[in-house]
Image (tube, grey):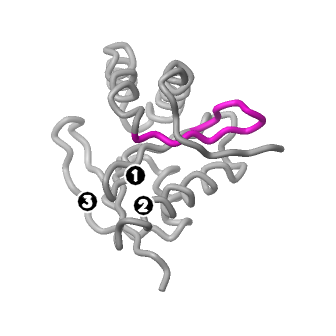
Amino acid sequence: MKKEIRKASHNELEQLKKIARKTIDINYRSFLGDEGVDWFINSGASDEYINDNIDDCWLLLCENQVIGFSVCKLNLIDLMMIDTEYHRKGYGTMLIKHSEDYLFKQYNEIVLESFEGNIQANNFYRKNNWIEKEIKFDEASGLNKIIFSKKPKS
């Protein structure tokens, strides 16, 4: 299978929004609740985030189809999503490694945040050698977030 990671373009906005809405709808209900997920998607906040961050977005394509993306801003992996149909097939690991390599060219330590209740994502980050740095309360969501960090291998 042909796989590729490259910068996103504005003509791919709708594909990214669709992946984000689907992933949030399926995977976030367990810790954000139905009301929180429905609000986030229906308010347009999810779509707005993609619009605002397209220039910092990397796409993961398989057979020329967008199956995931990451948003890298400064030393932060701000968001990473893989279409739920492609979970647990190695694509997330491929995308996070690319994001790490990209950020380590500029920074000696990189970070990401994840909802404390997002068990699947948190286990994925730990499996990929991310270290839990702290837990902080996120006022916008009313939930705790785990701050993970990683340094390049010596």
Helix, strand or loop status at disc 3 = strand
Q: Name the residue under label 3.
A: 135
Q: Main secondary structure of the magenta part?
A: strand
Helix, strand or loop status at disc 1 = strand
Which residue is located at x 56 percent, y 66 percent?
127
Mark closer to the chain start, 3 or 1: 1
Cα separation, mark 2 vs mark 1, equals 8 Å
For residue 17: magenta?
A: no
Q: Do the residues labelled 3 and 1 touch (CB within 8 Å)?
A: no
Q: Seen in the image, is 116 located left or right of residue 94?
A: left
The amino acid type, in three-letter code, at marker 2 is Leu
For residue 65: magenta?
A: yes
The amino acid type, in three-letter code, at marker 3 is Ile
Helix, strand or loop status at disc 2 = helix
Q: Name the residue under label 2.
A: 103
Cα separation, mark 3 vs mark 1, equals 17 Å
Q: In this view, does 9 lie above or below 5?
A: above
In this picture, which residue range is highlighted in magenta? 56-68
The amino acid type, in three-letter code, at marker 1 is Ile
Q: Nearer the viewer, residue 120 or 151?
A: 151
Residue 3 spot, x, y in % from top left? 73, 45
Residue 120 spot, x, y in % from top left? 52, 50
Q: In this view, does 94 lie above or below 80?
A: below
Q: Mark 1 points at which residue?
A: 77
Q: Which mark is residue 123?
A: none
Count neighbours of disc 2 (C-alpha within 10 A) and say few if under 14, some if 14 to 19, many if 20 or more: many
